[in-house]
Amino acid sequence: MHFNFHENFRQLANADLLKIVRQADEYQPAAVQAATDILQERKVPESDIVEVDNFFTGKLAAEQKKIGQRQVLKEQVVDFIEPLLKPDQEIKPAKWLKILLVVIAVQFIWENFYTVSALVYALWNGFFRAEDLFYFAL
């Protein structure tokens, strides 16, 4: 079965055809050729070309920003766990303190999760009333 790109692309707007041409690696060569031929037949305004170029420039900048953010996050994680991965002769108390605080925070969350869930279970099943909690708090 042969797909006629040229006939189907005739209904597309100039901006859509320009996007196909600009993203040639994501389309079949016949589709890119059909889009190029149609654009050459039409008188494409410069504003459409600038609009598509701005779109791809913004898209590329967003991708580069995302890659940069991932790299920064990766460096921060490696720096954070460096004392565990690569113990050194020199002790860096600030880094060990951060690790200790994270461990304590995880333990605190873990313990409170079970305490709160047991409290909710007791309240839900009527073992005691909510007013009793306020009585003990005073």
Image (spheres, rainbow, N blue to C red):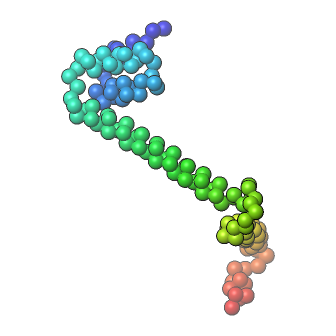
Measured as percent of width and height from the top left, residue 75 is found at 60, 53
Residue 137: in sight, yes or no?
yes
Q: Quadrant of residue 13?
A: top left
Measured as percent of width and height from the top left, residue 72 is found at 55, 53
Measured as percent of width and height from the top left, residue 101 is found at 69, 70
Residue lying at 42% horizontally and 24% vertically, measured from the top left:
24
Residue lying at 36% horizontally and 24% vertically, measured from the top left:
21
Q: Quadrant of residue 28?
A: top left
Q: Is residue 40 above or below residue 103?
A: above
Foreground pick, 77 / 38: 77
Residue lying at 35% horizontally and 16% vertically, measured from the top left:
34
Residue 125: in sight, yes or no?
no
Q: Quadrant of residue 42?
A: top left
Foreground pick, 69 / 108: 69
* Quadrant occupied by the C terminus: bottom right
- Relative placement, left or right, of 94 versus 54 is right
